[in-house]
């Protein structure tokens, strides 16, 4: 088990046939992480996160969120922060960006977790049907959630100040130094190591085919082990939840 990115860099450098920069290994580790997460949801990437919209952090300059308006007129970020304008247009107030790193939302709560207010999921089409853009928000507590890109849509549209707590799959922090660590380094260091070695051969030393087969086999082995463990843990959790609900299937 590795404690930091530097542990993996050291092991890769001992294996490498040519000089390899630390920065290249960090970049390749992040490529491996993206490859794995595009194919599965690793068990250690399930987590809670939070996003809060306030007057001073109002996301009015976010490209995925419609601009803020008050009674039909556009308002600026500075107007909102100073309190001289309070947006009331549905399309702006209902749109809240994902928490940092969130890749796949599973359960969304209105407010803090201890508030215990779980929102129900509805489709994007149903959200637009229930809460048309022509209406104005009365600052109600949200009941439903949907998504558009990397943005949550909450209905009824909440007031300006709102917090969402989200359980889901989160992309770990990027690696930019040997001292860095993340959940992949702690829980899947061999997967990263063999993945980086595989990419080094593919990108830099493709002619060294004799070594490639073994590296790919080890990478695939680590990949499949993680996939099976993630599947087992999430399947077991679903069965436990079903038992609590008392279904005949369990």
Image: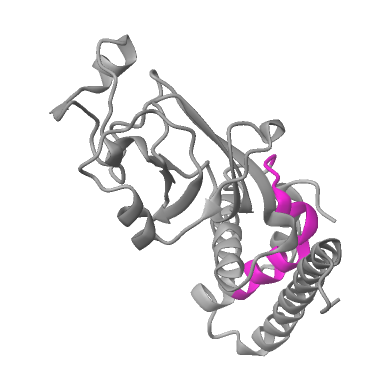
Q: Is 234 situated left or right of 64 in this image?
A: right
Residue 30 lies in quadrant: bottom right
Q: Is 130 situated left or right of 241 in this image?
A: left
Q: Is residue 92 magenta?
A: no
Q: Is residue 54 visible?
A: yes
Q: Is 121 situated left or right of 183 in this image?
A: left
Nearer to us in this view, 4 or 107: 107
Q: Position of residue 112 (x, y in %)?
A: 64, 31
Is 133 drawn above or below residue 57 in the view shown?
below
Nearer to us in this view, 219 or 36: 36
State the residue at coordinates (67%, 68%): 16
Q: Position of residue 213 (x, y in %)?
A: 68, 88
Is 244 drawn above or below residue 53 in the view shown?
below
State the residue at coordinates (55%, 63%): 34
Q: Which residues are magenta?
A: 179-198
Is 34 drawn above or below residue 247 in the view shown?
above
The prevailing secondary structure element of the residues shown in magenta is helix
Is 203 drawn above or below residue 30 in the view shown?
below
Q: Position of residue 15 (x, y in %)?
A: 73, 68
Nearer to us in this view, 80 or 102: 80
Residue 185 lies in quadrant: bottom right
Quadrant (top left/top right/bottom left/bottom right) for the N terminus: bottom right
Question: Please, which colouring scheme is shown?
Answer: one colour
Q: Is residue 17 visible?
A: no
Nearer to us in this view, 172 or 210: 172
């Amino acid at each position: 088990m590795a404690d930091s990115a530097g542990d993996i860099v050291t092991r890769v450098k001992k294996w490498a046939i040519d000089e390899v920069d630390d920065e290249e290994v960090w970049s390749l580790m992040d490529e491996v992480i993206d490859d794995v997460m595009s194919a599965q949801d690793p068990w250690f990437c399930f987590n809670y996160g939070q996003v809060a919209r306030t007057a001073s952090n109002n996301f009015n300059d976010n490209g995925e969120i419609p601009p803020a308006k008050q009674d039909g007129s556009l308002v600026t970020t500075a107007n909102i922060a100073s309190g001289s304008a309070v947006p009331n247009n549905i399309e702006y107030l209902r749109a809240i960006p994902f928490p940092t790193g969130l890749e796949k939302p599973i359960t969304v709560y209105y407010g803090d977790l201890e508030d215990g207010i779980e929102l129900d999921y509805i489709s994007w089409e149903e959200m637009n049907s229930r809460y048309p853009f022509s209406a104005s928000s009365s600052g109600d507590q949200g009941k439903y959630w949907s998504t558009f890109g990397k943005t949550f849509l909450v209905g009824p549209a909440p007031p300006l100040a709102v917090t969402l707590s989200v359980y889901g799959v989160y992309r770990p922090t990027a690696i930019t130094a040997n001292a860095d660590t993340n959940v992949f380094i702690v829980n899947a260091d061999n997967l990263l190591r063999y993945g980086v070695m595989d990419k080094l051969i593919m990108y830099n030393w493709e002619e060294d085919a004799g070594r490639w087969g073994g590296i790919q086999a080890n990478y695939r082995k680590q990949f499949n082990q993680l996939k099976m463990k993630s599947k087992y843990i999430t399947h077991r959790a679903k069965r436990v939840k079903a038992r609590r609900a008392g279904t005949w299937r369990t």
